[in-house]
């Protein structure tokens, strides 16, 4: 069966897909959203209770406009939905100066972050190790480590954000079909057909924002060059919860070595008994498809992460394991975004891979992708991220 023509189909309703669906529907487009699960869900990359959001982006100056626009859009979505999505807890970054630490494919991440803050006039402070210890007694940087503090940064709640975008999209007339796995995307004269296990949907264009499922759906160079990496996040019970409460404890990133895995990040305890969330990034374990992903995390795995990252750096956060979770990164070369019109299939817009640092940018990505689809030209904010470099020779 063929299920009604539309202006736009969005495949994948996680962070970017839900935002694109909302912004397209808000503009009056006839849009259909498809997801193999029931978003928000815990099978992809858009879950885990909290995500960091910051404006000074060490991954590159080209990301800063996305981050700054997104923080404005979070507030707009909050007003329209009535939900609390963003909390400005402040962000603290700790690193030895000149370490040359690699983070999301970039060296000298601390220095690049400071450069971005200065270039865009983003409010920030430089803190010495004694100042960090005085302000946040639980944190113990070494004497050779320094801090960068961004007061306007903080955290967003990913499940709430996805749910709010989808609810607002539906309010603006979007049709949402969840629990349907897309099995094929075909180009037609003047449009596209997206087939699921139960129906076929036709539209003028399609946005593929399917995260870890995107390489398999897109095929070709995407399947060859995008990698899937298993990630774990862990929650530990603090000895004194008040010391880790929002307002007293910041969101943080701590780089202590030169390697891509020699750093970790964390959050305040967002609700009593929830635990303090701690995570790093892992690239040693890859998976061929998201269905092959090992979603089991053992206590030993969590305690190993605690011993490697937390021990000796954070006081009052013992290895009292609460629980852990798994997500998957879809990583592009150099950890750069891949967003734009496919160079070989003009009616197909790719929104992947965000390489583990995309959630903070997702509202602006969704807005810009809706503009690309409905207006026809690439918004300048997306120009640095086109898939040509991935697909081309």
Image (cartoon, helix red, strand yellow):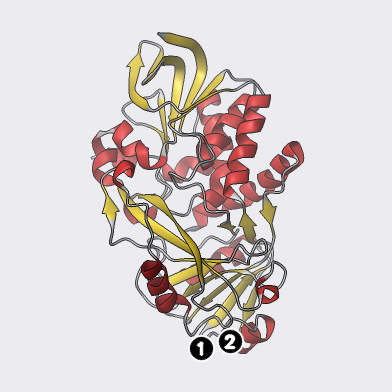
| Near-viewer residue (388 or 271) | 271
Q: Are marks 1 and 2 in contact (CB under 8 Å)?
A: yes
The vertical placement of 107 against 167, above or below, is below
Question: Is the C terminus in the top left, top right, bottom left or bottom right quadrant?
Answer: top left
Left or right of 50, for residue 230 = left
The residue singled out by tag 1 in the image is 142
| Near-viewer residue (200 or 79) | 200
Q: Quadrant of residue 36?
A: top left
The vertical placement of 205 against 350, above or below, is above
- The residue under the point 47% across, 54% down is 357
The vertical placement of 202 against 105, above or below, is above
Left or right of 229, for residue 53 = right
- The residue under the point 58% across, 66% down is 275
- The residue under the point 43% across, 44% down is 43
Question: Is the N terminus in the top left, top right, bottom left or bottom right quadrant?
Answer: top left
> Visible in this render: residue 64?
yes
| Near-viewer residue (306 or 130) | 306
Q: Mark 1 to mark 2: distance in Å?
A: 7 Å
> Visible in this render: residue 392?
no
Is label 1 in a helix, a strand or a loop? loop
């Amino acid at each position: 069966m063929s299920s009604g023509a539309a202006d736009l189909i969005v495949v994948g309703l996680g962070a970017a897909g839900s935002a694109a669906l909302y912004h397209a529907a808000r503009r009056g487009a006839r849009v259909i959203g498809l997801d193999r699960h029931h978003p928000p869900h815990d099978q992809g990359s858009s879950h885990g209770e909290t995500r960091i959001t910051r404006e000074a982006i060490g991954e590159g100056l080209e990301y800063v406009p996305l981050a700054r626009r997104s923080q404005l859009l979070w507030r707009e979505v909050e007003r329209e939905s009535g939900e609390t999505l963003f909390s400005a807890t402040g962000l603290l970054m700790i690193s030895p100066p000149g370490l040359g630490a690699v983070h999301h494919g970039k060296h000298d991440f601390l220095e690049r972050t400071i450069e971005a803050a200065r270039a865009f006039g983003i409010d920030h402070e430089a803190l010495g190790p004694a100042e960090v210890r005085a302000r946040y007694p639980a944190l113990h940087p070494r004497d050779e480590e320094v801090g960068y503090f961004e007061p306007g940064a903080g955290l967003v709640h990913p499940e709430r954000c996805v749910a709010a975008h989808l609810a607002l999209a539906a309010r603006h007339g979007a049709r949402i079909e969840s629990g349907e796995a897309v099995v094929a995307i075909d180009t037609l004269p003047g449009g596209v057909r997206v087939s699921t296990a139960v129906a076929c949907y036709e539209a003028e264009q399609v946005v593929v924002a399917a995260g870890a499922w995107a390489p398999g759906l897109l095929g070709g160079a995407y399947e060859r060059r995008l990698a899937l990496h298993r990630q774990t996040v862990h929650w530990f019970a603090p000895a004194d919860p008040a010391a880790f409460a929002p307002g007293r404890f910041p969101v943080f990133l701590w780089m202590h070595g030169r390697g891509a895995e020699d750093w970790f990040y964390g959050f305040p305890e967002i609700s009593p008994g929830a635990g303090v969330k701690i995570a790093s990034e892992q690239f040693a374990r890859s998976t061929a498809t998201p269905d092959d992903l090992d979603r089991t995390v053992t206590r030993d795995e969590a305690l190993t992460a605690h011993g490697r990252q937390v021990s000796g750096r954070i006081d009052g956060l013992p290895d009292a394991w609460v629980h852990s979770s798994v997500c998957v990164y879809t990583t592009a070369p150099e950890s750069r975004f891949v967003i734009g019109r496919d160079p070989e299939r003009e009616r197909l817009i790719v929104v992947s891979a965000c390489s583990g640092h995309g959630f903070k940018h997702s509202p602006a990505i969704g807005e810009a992708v809706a503009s690309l689809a409905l207006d026809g030209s690439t918004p300048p904010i997306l120009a640095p991220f086109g898939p040509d470099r991935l697909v081309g020779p």
